[in-house]
Image (cartoon, rainbow, N blue to C red):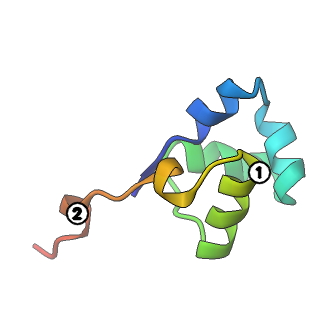
Amino acid sequence: MRNRIKEFRARYDMTQEQLARKVGICRETIVYLEKNAYNPSLKLAHQIAKALGTTLDELYIFDEEDDRIK
């Protein structure tokens, strides 16, 4: 799963710190999310989407190939 958090933050001229505070998490979590190094819980994903004024479908990109068992 990939995300567009950085892109949406830029639309609102929002720093990682500002988004983290708005959602109630540490800035480092935003860093990991933006690098796609961490998949958030459904609750956190929803909170981030809400804080950025968008939907889960717009913010997160589900890549079916990443989910296939090899």
Asked whether 41 or 70 is in front, the reply is 41
Establish if 39 lies above or below 61.
below
Q: Residue at x 60, y 49 (%)?
A: 32
The crowding category of the residue bearing disc 2, from other C-alpha atoms within 10 Å (few below 14, some 14 to 19, many at least 20), is few
Quick one: SS at disc 2?
helix
Circle 2: residue type: Glu
**Which quadrant holds the N terminus?**
bottom left
Specify which label sits upstream in the sequence, 1 or 2: 1
The crowding category of the residue bearing disc 1, from other C-alpha atoms within 10 Å (few below 14, some 14 to 19, many at least 20), is some
Residue bearing the label numbered 2: 64
Q: Which numbered mark, 1 or 2, is in the foreground of this view?
A: 1
Asked whether 65 or 46 is in front, the reply is 46
Q: Residue at x 62, y 35 (%)?
A: 8
Quarter assignment of residue 64: bottom left
Residue bearing the label numbered 1: 51
Disc assigned to residue 17: none
Taking the image as shown, residue 58 lies to the left or right of residue 46, namely left
- Where residue 18 appears, as percent x and y from the top left, is 86, 39
